[in-house]
Amino acid sequence: MTIPIVLFSGCGGGTNGDEESGVEGTSISATTAFSSVVTGSDGTGVTGETSQTSAQAREGCLACHEGIEEIHPGLEISCVTCHGGDPEATTREAAHVLPLGCLGETPGVNDYACDPDYIRFINPADLHIADETCGLCHTGYVERVRKSMMSLTTGHFIGGLFENGVQESRIARYGMMDMVDDDGFVPHERGAVSHVEQIPPFDENADETLLSTQYMDLPRKECATCHLWAPGKARPGEYRSYGCAACHIPYAYDGLSQSLDPTIPLDQPGHPIKHQITRKLGTEVCARCHYRGARIGLSFQGRFQLVEGTPAGPGVPGTTSVPYNGAYLGEEPENTPPDIHFQRGMDCIDCHFVNDVMGDGNIYTHMNMAVEIECTDCHGTPWSYSNLLTSRGAPIENLRKEGGRFILTTKVTGKELEVPQVKDVLNPDHPRYNPRAARAMTPKHLKEEGGLECYACHSAWTVNCYGCHMKRDASQNGF
């Protein structure tokens, strides 16, 4: 009986070990706590369920799924709070939510509205219905995520649309679906827009001699893979779920489960590592999407895409021994070293906090407009130390000042790292003084208007897109 757990299937990320995958180091037990409701002081749960419902779930759901992990360690949540269904039923068909039959084999983003109960049963973290599940406790977050870059992928669309003549401005017009920011606050000065339309389909009747016509066949086929409304591709290194579970329910590299649920075949890919939510998201989780166009997930680890046809694979020096996202990658530490933060044991989430990842409630045109963390937030400036706040005033919760030192605690492993301060590096009387840095970090270079960004000098290397072209073959209906 696999349906309730395949719920977070489709495609997933992660690696095989708990520590590497970012799964919480919480003891897993097949207790009945999982089947209890989120209980309030009055004995009722977040959906008005009572302890009677919990008992029914224990007798019903766990009759088949005995051994399944607690979905939210430390918080008692019943099966039906997330999945729906009938905990009193004694057969699979009666207990599970069955589809109405209105969803096609490849439904579009907007088509899911026809059967909300079924999509909730399959994946309670689906953004179409997550306000009724995750949002019951995490108030406001679901709406923020829906308007985020990872949901709408406006940043991916706008570059190609502008460069290929589809639209005349660099301001976002299209996203994965129609979205309106109606909360009354739209910071246009930071690149936010009040609404976007769903990216239109390819128009077969448009003028085929125009590049803009040909290009419009690309976004839905190639650019729309990595967004939170749908799973990733079911292949090694790219298994992940969608909605909130795309990040918070990690998958292994091979998509195989390690769950104690007896209904999950351990040799069948497409299942999460465990039926358990985590906030400890390793870099490999982010890299399930942030490769190719958003290839920072590769370069952060010192990896890069190879020119098509380049020999690669097991036994080939300078390449990975296993494929990621359908291809072997280059890996030459002496030429393309990992980012210094990765070398020190940091993961993406150690810098990119909730507003960067889940959105701040605004619809942005470009990724750099949505990101609020800056190098100076942690490292300070030549004139001042870090104030422990992001560029937009949010507290950096994993950074603290201890005496004269600034200490960052990594979120996945708990490792403590001292964060060098630019002011100290430029001070001849400080042990961290670096004369080469002092010669480079001049007021002219670092002035607020027209000055250089830190990464203009401190990026060891970066990829470029020169020589990367696409050919559309209409006879093959693709690229």
Image (cartoon, rainbow, N blue to C red):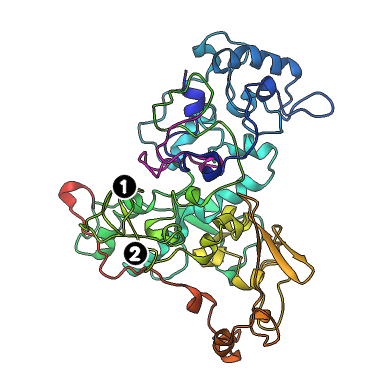
Q: Quadrant of residue 252?
A: top left
User: In what element is the residue under mark 1?
Assistant: loop
Please give the residue where the numbered disc 2 appears in the rendered image: 166
Residue at image location 73% in from the left, 30% down from the top: 46
Q: What secondary structure characterizes most of the magenta part?
A: loop
Percent across and percent down for residue 417 are 65, 62
- Give the residue at x 46% y 32%: 271
Camera-side mark, 2 or 1: 1
Classify mark 2: helix, strand or loop. Answer: loop
Place residue 231 in its image quadrant: top left
At horizontal 66% and vertical 83% (from top left) the residue drawn is 382
Amino acid on which the number 2 mark rests in the picture: Val
Q: Earlier in the sequence, mark 2 or mark 1?
A: 2
Camera-nearest residue between 92 and 143? 92
The range drawn in magenta is 232-258
> Looking at the image, how many numbered discs can be counted on the residues?
2
Question: Mark 1 is on which residue type?
Answer: Gly
Q: Is residue 388 visible?
A: no
Question: Residue 367, relative to residue 145: is it above or below?
Answer: below
Q: 200 or 76, which is in the foreground?
A: 76
Residue 430 part of the magenta-drawn span: no
> Is residue 20 among what the camera can see?
yes
